[in-house]
Amino acid sequence: MAADQKANERAYVGLKAAILSGDLRLRQRLDIEKLAQRFEVSATPVRQALAILAFERLVSVHSSRIYHVAFWSEAELHHLYAWRGDLARLALQTYQPSPFVQPDEDPRDYVASYARVMAHIEVSANPELHRCTRGVDDRLHAALRVEIEVLQDAAKEMRALLALLRHGGPPLRAALRRFFRRRADASARIRALAHARALPRNGD
């Protein structure tokens, strides 16, 4: 039983990490047997992992139980950004303004900076809100990776949010509203670039 649990966890954690990193590309078909070999498990843990990831909407299921890495429509991506903005503003209700301490990690890593800023804002938030934000951010991960290319001053926006964390209040609330609204408005361009980045390269 313990061995089965470890196999299930290894398949789920490994598969999810491969999706979030982009190693498994948007819209890529997921071959159960190849994934089982990759994670050194049987097909059953892979199927269970795919079922969970389909529930989390990181994987889409087509007819005859064919799985692909999920890829949002333009409308879905727009709604995800809008919902993420709503969640961030909900978190502000319990946010206690405090300076943000920049960790030793590379500050040029836009996706990591985004995650740290949002975690700082949500540190005192309801645990259920945390679960929602993690799920939405997982689904947005491929979009976050290309935002900085579509929105040329995205890094500048992130630095502005960092500066506002110290005082919070209406300026931070307004900045968050602009931050997510701008990304929702750019959904078509973000989606197009994410799709282009996910196209197989020569020799793949």
Image (cartoon, rainbow, N blue to C red):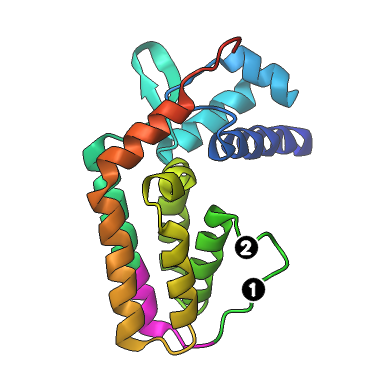
Residue plotted at (64% across, 40% down) = 13
Q: Residues within 10 Å of mark 2 (few under 14, many from 20)?
A: few
Q: Which residue is mark 2?
A: 107
Task: Please say if the residues under marks 1 and 2 sit with CB atoms less than 8 Å apart.
Answer: yes
- Secondary element at tag 2: loop
The C terminus sits in image quarter: top right
Task: Measuring from the top left, give residue 199's x and y in whole percent.
Answer: 46, 21
The N terminus sits in image quarter: top right
Above or below, 104 against 135 in this view is below
Residue plotted at (45% across, 76% down) = 125
Task: Measuring from the top left, give residue 154's x and y in whole percent.
Answer: 42, 58
Note whether residue 32 is visible. Answer: yes
User: In the figure, residue 150 lies in which quadrant?
Assistant: top left
Task: Measuring from the top left, give residue 63's x and y in whole percent.
Answer: 34, 14
Q: Which residue is mark 1?
A: 102
Residue plotted at (65% across, 32% down) = 11
Above or below, 102 against 144 in this view is below
Disc 2 marks which amino acid? Pro
Note whether residue 26 is visible. Answer: no
Above or below, 170 against 147 in this view is below
- Whether residue 90 appears in magenta in the rendering, the answer is yes
Disc 1 marks which amino acid? Gln
Please indicate whether residue 162 sits to the left or right of residue 13 in the image: left
Please indicate whether residue 129 sits to the left or right of residue 43 in the image: left
Q: Residues within 10 Å of mark 1 (few under 14, many from 20)?
A: few
Please tell me which residue lies in front, 188 or 89: 188
Q: Magenta stretch?
A: 88-98
> Disc 1 versus disc 2: distance between alpha carbons?
8 Å
Residue plotted at (37% across, 79% down) = 92
Please indicate whether residue 188 sits to the left or right of residue 155 in the image: left
Task: Measuring from the top left, give residue 96's x and y in whole percent.
Answer: 47, 88
- Whether residue 152 appears in magenta in the rendering, the answer is no
